[in-house]
Amino acid sequence: MSKFLGRLALAFTLSGVGCGAGGSLSDDERSQIEGKVLVVDAFAEAERRRDVEAILAFIARDFYMYADGARVDYETVAAQIRSTMPALQRFETTWSDVEVTVLARDQALVSLVFRDAVTDGDGVTTRLRGPTTFVWSLREGGWRLIYADADHYPDVL
């Protein structure tokens, strides 16, 4: 089990994972959320692999986000991913301080701190860090991102 996956599982355990109006989760519902944890880890891995189609498969068509305070929609994000990821030599990302809050049986909020080291086609590496919030929703047979917020700051080693 990856460190990230372990932190998410621990966050679920420590939070008591309740579920709004329906009360506590059943074993089946808890298993469903554990499956979501695997999806979140797979999303991070798709980013590391720079796998454009795998990344986009996690994002709902009605997705929007605030990136450094600017609101962007799915089409803008998808275009940026399609143009940027293939040109990179390397995309390293780590997530820490992961917290999961179950909002409903089909929605969860994940907040974390990311650290990215992005190496462009010329071999220049840019290091960034910052807070991120994701809202995941169970739809279309899987967990999809419907909202995100990320602030990027220089990460000085």
Image (spheres, rainbow, N blue to C red):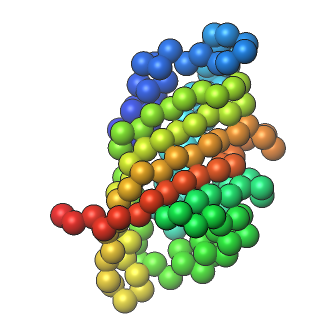
User: Which residue appears at 41% of the width and 63% of the height?
Assistant: 152
Q: Nearer the viewer, residue 37 or 96?
A: 96
Q: Residue furthest right?
A: 140
User: Which residue appears at 43% of the width and 44% of the height?
Assistant: 112
Question: Visible in this render: residue 55?
Answer: no
In the image, taking residue 153 as reference, residue 38 lies left or right, namely: right
Question: Visible in this render: residue 34?
Answer: yes
Q: Quadrant of the C terminus?
A: bottom left
Q: How many marks?
A: 0
User: Which residue appears at 40% of the width and 81% of the height?
Assistant: 120
Does residue 92 sit above or below 38 in this rendering?
Answer: below
Quadrant in the picture for residue 151: bottom left
In the image, taking residue 123 as reference, residue 19 lies left or right, namely: right
- The image position of residue 69, as x and y in percent, is 53, 63
User: Which residue appears at 51% of the width and 32% of the height?
Assistant: 100
Quadrant in the picture for residue 36: top right
- The image position of residue 85, as x and y in percent, is 53, 74
Quadrant in the picture for residue 8: top left
Q: Quadrant of the N terminus?
A: top left
- The image position of residue 128, as x and y in percent, is 35, 65
Does residue 5 sit above or below 118 in this rendering?
Answer: above
- The image position of residue 148, as x and y in percent, is 59, 52
Q: Nearer the viewer, residue 112 or 46?
A: 112
